[in-house]
Image (spheres, rainbow, N blue to C red):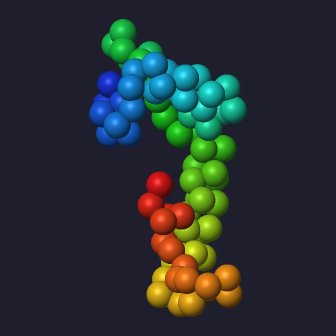
Amino acid sequence: MGPTQIMYKANLSWVILVAHLKELVKYEIISEHKVNARMTYLLTNRGIKLLQSYLLVVAEFEQFDVGEESPHGGHQSASLLAW
């Protein structure tokens, strides 16, 4: 996927997107590839493992009853999973 497509799908400004892409490349979560004079980005093996770990954590949270009373009063919220 190219940077413009990522920018629109992630609803980010160009400056913020470029900063995030640089960090993700730096930590080897994604890799940059030039294809026909255009930059594309792909998940690396490390990125795939990170995504799988994230999905496992999300699945664990989904097992909780969102309407359940919290020990601190009030109700638990699923807002953690919304970002």
Q: Residue pushed farthest top?
A: 37
| Residue 37, x across and y down, in percent | 36, 9
| Residue 70, x across and y down, in percent | 61, 85
- Residue 53 appears left or right of 79: right
Q: How many marks?
A: 0
Q: Residue at x 53, y 83 (%)?
A: 75
Q: Residue at x 56, y 34 (%)?
A: 30
* 43 shown above or below 34: below
Q: Nearer the viewer, residue 82 or 63?
A: 82
| Residue 39, x across and y down, in percent | 42, 18
Residue 63 visible? The answer is no
Q: Quadrant of residue 76?
A: bottom right
Quadrant, the N terminus: top left
Q: Residue pushed farthest front?
A: 73
Q: Nearer the viewer, residue 69 or 52?
A: 69
| Residue 67, x across and y down, in percent | 47, 87
Q: Residue at x 49, y 34 (%)?
A: 42
Residue 67 visible? The answer is yes
Q: Quadrant of residue 25?
A: top right
